[in-house]
Amino acid sequence: MVEVAGAVGFCYSRREGRSGLSSEGRMARVDIIMPLYNKAHCVERAIRSVARQTLSDWRLIVVDDGSTDGGGELVRALGDERIEVLAQANGGPAAARNAGLERADGEYVAFLDADDEWLAGYLEHAVGALEEGDAAMVGAMYYDCPGMRDMSGFWRRAGVRCGRFEVGAEAAAAWVEATLLFFHVGNTVVRREVAECYGGFYAPAGCRLGEDTVFFFRVGINEAFVIIEAAGAVHHREDSGLSNVRPRPVAAPLLEPESVLRYTPAAKRGLMEAVLGRVALRAARAQARAGCRAEAAALLRRFPAARQFGGAYWRCRYEMAMSGVMPVWVRLKCAVGPVVRGWLRRWGRRLGLVGAAPRLDEGSSEQGGGSDE
């Protein structure tokens, strides 16, 4: 996978997809790439969710990224011939996913972290939507744990819609930002040649956040994509160390915006700069709310496009001015918010206003819809 100096253009849509046989026999239709680093306590849960997929033509490539807890040995001991384990020195999740991409030879690639899981019909729904929509990438709605919170309502409020889309140069930056941020490694299937065309995952040394965002921004600004309503993934924040870090590290596209912009067609560069300005504004607010005023100010200076989003920009400036007390307010909200949401969720289910979360046992093929919480 080689990065290019200029915008790539429409890698998939302007040529036929590659197919054929690998040197080792018939390739699987979908290669699933799973980075593994010290997740022995939950990796079997993730693998069970792959095994119960209604689309059975898959291969799972587990990249043991220097684990020290025996997770790689545990996966090997499962003895499933559809699971291949690669071992490498610790290089981070992006480097592990890229190693998996180098090994992949299926028509499609899917990504699943070792601490997350899928609902049973996920791959079948995703591949069907890719083929029906003649698209490069598909993303599915998902649940967030703990609590199995249906995230479809959250994304609808952010402006994300289901359907097939191509980003035009005149698209609204707010819609593009929300839509491209919707895609993440747990809920997305991509045509393999597209993943290769756009350089795989951004993997500089020390990058801790947003390497997948760079990848999905590169694909989404160039290629057709589909968003499907059927929930397919379960994201376990309780098992993700990075999800619980506050303040969160600055994401990769904000550390090196050219990692996205050099893959952006000239006609859409202004749009992508505005999108990155919105991402920077969101990150600056998070830094201000964590009491990190200087870091927030540095982000706003680095991305002057953030100024064009007046209301959000001045809200961020206000939070920067109040950064001395914002951490106390945020801790209070974090303490009270889950209790209130849990109470509302329980009563919503009793009153039939909120659908029950799907079962994740071995026999489940249930697909979540979209009941707003």
Image: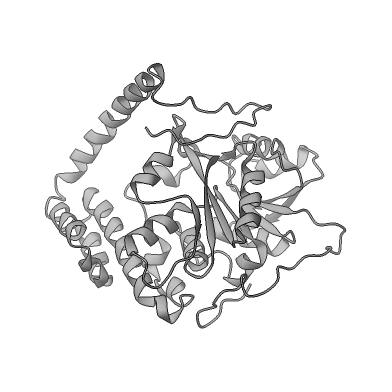
| Outermost top residue | 350
Give x and y (percent) for residue 327.
21, 43
On screen, residue 34 versus residue 177, left or right, reads right
Residue 314: name its quadrant: bottom left
Q: Is residue 313 above or below residue 301?
A: above
| Point 63% across, 55% down: residue | 132
Front residue of 179/186: it is: 179
Q: Quadrant of the C terminus?
A: top left
Give x and y (percent) for residue 129.
61, 51
Q: Quadrant of the N terminus?
A: bottom right
Is residue 348 visible in the rendered structure shown here?
yes
Give x and y (percent) for residue 14.
63, 75
On screen, residue 21 versus residue 257, left or right, reads right
| Point 52% across, 66% down: residue | 219
Image color mode: one colour
Q: How many marks?
A: 0
| Point 66% across, 67% down: residue | 193
Residue 333: name its quadrant: top left
Is residue 250 visible in the rendered structure shown here?
no
| Point 83% across, 63% down: residue | 22
Q: Is residue 206 above or below residue 258?
A: above
